[in-house]
Image: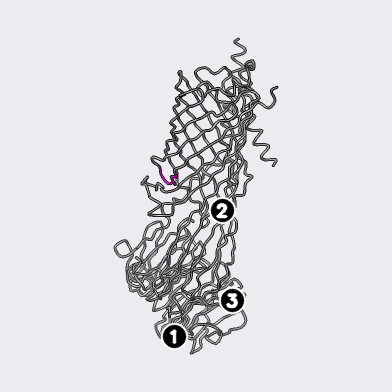
Amino acid sequence: MQKRNLQLLNNTYRLILFLLVTLTACEKAPDDLKDPATTDKWTLYNTGTGLPGNQVRGTFCDSKGNMWFAVTYNGAAKFADNTWTYYNTSNSGILSNNATCIGEDSAGNILIGTTNGVSILTSSGTWSYFRDSNTALYITCFKTDKDDNIWTGTYGQGILIFDGNDIGQIYYDEYKDVNDIETDSKGNVWVATENGILKWDGSRLSVMGTSDGLPDDVVTALYSDSRNRLWIGTYFGRTVSWIDSQGIHQLSLFNDRIVEINDICEDAAGNIWFATYTSGLIKYNNAVPYSYKKYNGFPEDDVMASARDNDGNVWFGLYSKGLSRYSLPLN
Amino acid sequence: MKLNLKMVFIIMLWVVPFSLITGQTEKPARDKYTLLTMAYNQRPLTLYKGQLQANAGYRLGVRTKSFDGTGSKISLKENGAASVFHTYIMEIKYGITDFLELGADAYYLRNGIRSETSSLLSGGGTITTNSLNEYRGFGDITVAAAVRVPMEYKMWDFSLKGAVTLPVAEYQPSQPTHILTDYQSPNNYTVNYHFNNNNGYGVPLYTLSAVGKFTLSKVSVEARGSYRFPAKEGESIRWGWTLFGSTFTYYNNPYSYLPDRSLSINGSIHYQAAGWFDIFLGGYYLKTSSGWTEYFESKFANPEVTLVTIEPGFELQISPSLTIYQYAGLQLTGENTDAPFYVLTTISFNMFPFWK
């Protein structure tokens, strides 16, 4: 009887051990899961919640995931780990408080465009700058190409290209005002100007305008999306355009009415967002355009800039109300 | 397939030794009629040796409310889209001995959730979007083994059950079938989204259950606890599309996921009103945890679901081989879940096919 009890006990221990091994061998959730309750939400940032000013002209996500904002008359602001850091002429090496755009070079240095040149915040925290000693250098945009050259757009000075050692310039009188610069998956550089698009394919510069299918010659925004479409926004166009391997296509956002595009970006779900002047924010889900305006709860109808962060949020710089952040729904 | 056989083997590994631990011999066989007409309050938790049971069930679910993350009730008639579920359940079980039972079950689910949204554009256009989110198809097959205490049932019984849900059903969503209708101008048309989902889990799931039953005369109490957990992470796809002109072009992107772990506790009190009629009131508690789904290259925790349901029902013996079960489910409280009212009707066919 005692032997039988011992056997029973032994078998019971084996059974428990087996159950424990089976349970622990199965997949467990990792500890760094994100909270779904933080999604599908709009968040407004303004001077009341830490933004140094309410007019945001430039938005940028750096390679470390920090968000940067060019705030008119208030310098630049960085948002990281829910903390704001400000850079202005009284506390940093920034050239002007009239910041216009933010960029980053391949070494991780932050480029802050102003109406008086480029301020460079190195990854070690030191400042340097580039400006024209003869005239105010109005910077509008930055883009790094496949060879790590930094393309810098200006108003009035054309394009400045910095290859790490020297600065070159592309200047044509009719293309001296640059609104945006974008690269595509083939390595082409596209430049949006007040008089059409300049395309640099690595060896040749070509021009594109209304005669090539653009809805307007004043090109204000360019964006190369994850599906190799180059989106083109204009100032007086009744449509927005995109170029893919099939050619150029048109998309009517507002019943063929003129929509002034300020900026374009793509969210992590593949939606294309158009920041517009007077027409609010427009989301195109690749089938239907939806508008976000004051009448349906968006803070204002003038949206200056847009950018996507590493967490799936999209950020929109507003003309007078600060910043709006949208975290995408999980569906 | 190799993996599935391995999992069945794993379940059997812990089920069969348990039954052998006892070293109990089975009771002498009684006559078929007595066993087939055994009332609920006299029946053990597993089938008798040689008994074959085939169950066919239909569950009608009406999804009219849900519970949000704070536990507040949301009426889907007013703030969403109500819908109906049709679930067809098939189950077969066989008593290897009086103390060991093997079984398998599967289901077919059909559900469509419709919604309509009108999008007014500032240019004066109107784009109407209709959405049908449809779930249709077989679910995975679950194979199970249950053992009970090796003694004749008189007042109490205890059973352990192990089950593996095999990922045999389609689980990745099929390509959507969207169409465009009522096209009047570039900003005046109707988009009809039609999403085609399937019902499989895509990965194996294990379930461990323990059941206890206690009877005093005509009144019985039964309690069951079950814990289900996934074997591994799965990978599925999400469909995206572009509409150009009136033509939809589809593409898909992969994502990974881990199904939830779930704990469920059932309790029921039964009254054997007659030898052929048992009524009961059940309660059901469900809690899920630990699952996640990848979105935007990040892993998001699945919302943790809790749900408390009461289930009044009855069991009616029509003939020695035929029994009908029916119960309704009414959700009392919960979090992060739909709460469909449902009625489950099951016809149970019992026989001893190898008895002469």
Does label 1 or label 3 sit earlier along the sequence?
Answer: 1
Marked residue chain, label 3: A
Label 1 with label 2: CB-CB less than 8 Å: no
Left or right of residue B236: residue B186: left
Q: Mark 3: which secondary structure?
A: loop
Along the viewing direction, whichever of A14 and B6 lies nearer the viewer: B6
Q: Mark 1: which secondary structure?
A: loop
Along the viewing direction, whichever of A155 and B263 lies nearer the viewer: B263
Residue on which disc 3 sits: A188
User: Could you give the CA–CA distance between mark 1 and mark 3, rounded to whole angstroms?
Assistant: 23 Å
Marked residue chain, label 2: B
Residue on which disc 1 sits: A156
| Amino acid type at mark 1 | Gly
Q: Quadrant of residue B178?
A: bottom right
Q: Is residue A49 above or below residue B143?
A: below
Q: Residue furthest front?
A: B319
Label 1 with label 3: CB-CB less than 8 Å: no
Residue on which disc 2 sits: B197
Q: Mark 2: which secondary structure?
A: strand
Residue B19: x and y in percent read 62, 22
**Residue A119 appears in the figure:** no
